[in-house]
Image (cartoon, helix red, strand yellow):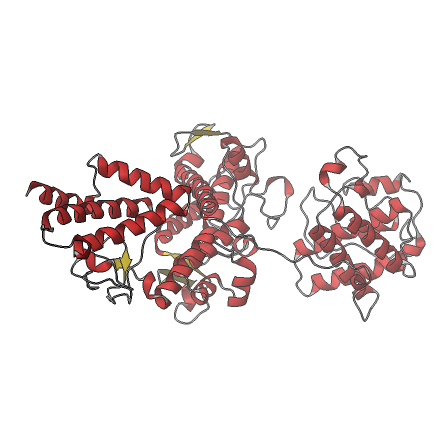
């Protein structure tokens, strides 16, 4: 039917497909309802006339869109990006079919703007309000980010197809939402790392259990014993696989090999920071290792003296990686991939990694699955937090410093506290605290206050009383400090009772001056707020009961025994 109407070929013959995978064909966009039909059923629906007649006015538009997509593929464009573009085009055409909008070169900009308005409206719908409304697909709420991505993807194709001088998305008023980075609290950061470690432990246990003997010989179902005490039972597949790349015929045991490769791939990404596509398509080579920083730079063996670095690993990972390479060499001697998944049933060897086996196990064990993107992000932020060096971290992550800080860095309360502490330690002398002879803090630079009373001790670092009128001394806002201060006052009261003679004016005694000064400090805590008042009440009660602060307990006992 298409040939009779002189319709161009709208498929993508340069792509490889699995035996059961539907061929990509934009001719479905030429029929009303074709964009929304199931990919595996749309061809049959067209032949049976279920979608009606072909719409001739759409041909020129669809042909131009096809040419732009094919051009990107020809110059090496990503298959996944192409699939995403086609999916967004189908969403757009599907909406136009339901809304009764024209899809031709003359009206496409107007239809596009109406679609953008529809997406903008959906991005403003509250999800709770939608719960009791109709289930119309075109009224379902979406995020502002999704609305912009849909429009931007289709808009870029239309700009090229129509040879526009300005971007069509500028007519819609939609703008890319600003990505706000929420700071991660210390507790949340700790929990995030704990979840990642739990997932990492699971990956390690899977790799340790699925050795050659288990994969090839252990009775099915095999048992994977985890360090948590849990046990995973894993059976084989329901069908056998073609025995092309394997030393032994795995038969229905191929899922066991695939499970370990899934785990190994995730560990590799976490260790190297390589993105998923690069890691999945990594070619197997004879690797050479060169010590670098706290790990190894890995190159192809023949170019070990000057070739490009393929990736970097931590020192502790090398033994694990070598063990995996030996394992895969036994099972996949003819494969050129570092992570050669078995794809039975005619699926493509380069099909996107979904980690569905690991996801199922995590669901079974109630462990959070940590995806490749999150693993890379966690690794980068861990390096940044521990090194506090953006330049070094950017080099290790193979990014520019601007990309690292703008895209990957997560604001961290813990890291901010560390950086603030370091800053004040360098600029504020009172942050470089030393141990004062009296309760409190100082920098070890005594300087008497101008208001120091007559016969009060001069500021020095040899006597505790010398801290009481020292400009360098600082009080500490804590219950422990109030307790220490109260105990110190008790010691000075013992001293006062032993040094005052009948002919001496008590008011001018250095011990009396010290007691008065300490009492003023304690009174400030009592009158400050309820929390500090409770500290003082507690401190008084302890001293009355003979429970003195450890810093003064021995001196008090010595004074009382004399």
Q: Is residue 52 above or below residue 105?
A: above
Between 11 and 336, the one lying in front of the other is: 11
Residue at 16% x, 56% y is 509
Q: Is residue 420 above or below residue 536?
A: below
For the C terminus, the quadrant is top left
Residue 207, x across and y down, in percent: 42, 41
Residue at 49% x, 47% y is 266
Q: Is residue 309 above or below residue 256?
A: below
Residue 3, x across and y down, in percent: 89, 53
In the figure, is residue 157 to the left or right of 453? right
In the figure, is residue 449 to the left or right of 273? left
Between 50 and 521, the one lying in front of the other is: 521
Residue 187, x across and y down, in percent: 45, 44
In the figure, is residue 293 to the left or right of 552? right
Give the total number of marks visible in the rendering.
Answer: 0
Tell me if residue 443 can be seen.
yes
In the figure, is residue 43 to the left or right of 212? right
Tell me if residue 32 can be seen.
no
Q: Residue furthest front?
A: 503
Between 268 and 284, the one lying in front of the other is: 268
Residue at 81% x, 43% y is 138
Q: Residue furthest left?
A: 562
Residue at 35% x, 60% y is 294
Residue 47, x across and y down, in percent: 88, 41
């Amino acid at each position: 039917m298409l040939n009779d109407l002189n319709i161009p070929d709208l498929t993508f013959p340069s792509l490889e497909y699995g035996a059961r995978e539907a061929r990509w064909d934009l001719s479905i966009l030429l029929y009303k309802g074709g964009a929304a039909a199931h990919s595996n059923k749309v061809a049959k629906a067209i032949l049976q006339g279920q979608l009606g007649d072909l719409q001739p006015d759409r041909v020129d538009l669809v042909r131009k869109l096809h040419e732009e997509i094919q051009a990107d593929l020809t110059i090496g464009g990503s298959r996944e990006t192409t699939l995403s573009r086609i999916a967004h085009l189908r969403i757009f055409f599907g909406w136009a079919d339901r809304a009764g909008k024209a899809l031709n070169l003359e009206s496409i900009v107007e239809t596009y703007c109406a679609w953008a308005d529809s997406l903008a409206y959906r991005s403003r719908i509250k999800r709770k309000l939608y719960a009791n409304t109709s289930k119309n697909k075109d009224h379902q709420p979406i995020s502002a980010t999704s609305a912009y991505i849909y429009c931007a993807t289709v808009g870029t194709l239309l700009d090229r197809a129509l040879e526009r001088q300005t971007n069509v998305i500028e007519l819609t008023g939609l703008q890319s939402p600003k990505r706000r980075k929420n700071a991660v609290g210390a507790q949340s950061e700790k929990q995030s790392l704990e979840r990642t470690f739990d997932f990492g432990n699971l990956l390690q246990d899977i790799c340790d259990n699925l050795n050659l003997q288990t994969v090839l010989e252990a009775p099915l179902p095999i048992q994977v014993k985890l360090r948590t005490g849990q046990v995973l039972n894993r059976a084989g597949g329901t069908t056998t696989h073609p025995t092309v790349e394997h030393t032994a015929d795995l038969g229905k045991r191929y899922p066991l090999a695939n499970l370990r490769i899934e785990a190994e791939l995730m560990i590799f990404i976490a260790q190297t920071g390589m993105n998923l596509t690069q890691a999945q398509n990594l070619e197997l080579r004879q690797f050479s290792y060169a010590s670098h920083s706290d790990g190894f730079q890995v190159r192809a063996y023949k170019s070990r003296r000057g070739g490009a670095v393929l990736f970097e690993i931590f020192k502790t990972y090398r033994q694990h990686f070598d063990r995996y390479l030996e394992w895969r060499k036994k099972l996949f001697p003819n494969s050129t991939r570092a992570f050669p998944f078995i794809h039975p049933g005619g699926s493509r060897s380069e099909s996107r990694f979904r980690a569905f086996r690991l996801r199922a196990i995590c669901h079974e064990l109630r462990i959070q699955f940590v995806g490749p993107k999150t693993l890379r992000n966690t690794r980068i932020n861990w390096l940044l937090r521990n090194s506090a060096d953006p330049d070094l971290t950017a080099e290790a992550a193979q990014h520019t410093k601007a990309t690292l800080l703008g895209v990957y860095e997560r604001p961290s309360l813990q890291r901010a506290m560390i950086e603030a502490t370091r800053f004040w330690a360098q600029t504020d002398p009172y942050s470089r605290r030393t141990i004062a002879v009296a309760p409190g803090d100082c920098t070890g630079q005594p300087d008497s206050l101008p208001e120091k009373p007559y016969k009060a001790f001069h500021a020095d670092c040899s006597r505790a009383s010398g801290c009481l009128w020292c400009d360098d001394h600082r009080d500490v806002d804590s219950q422990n400090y109030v307790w220490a201060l109260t105990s110190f006052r008790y010691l000075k009261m013992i001293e006062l009772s032993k040094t005052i003679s009948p002919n001496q004016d008590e008011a001018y005694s250095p011990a009396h001056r010290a007691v008065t000064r300490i009492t003023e400090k304690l009174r400030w805590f009592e009158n400050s707020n309820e929390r500090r008042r409770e500290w003082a009440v507690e401190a008084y009660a302890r001293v009355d009961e003979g429970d003195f602060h450890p810093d003064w307990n021995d001196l008090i006992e010595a004074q009382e025994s004399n």
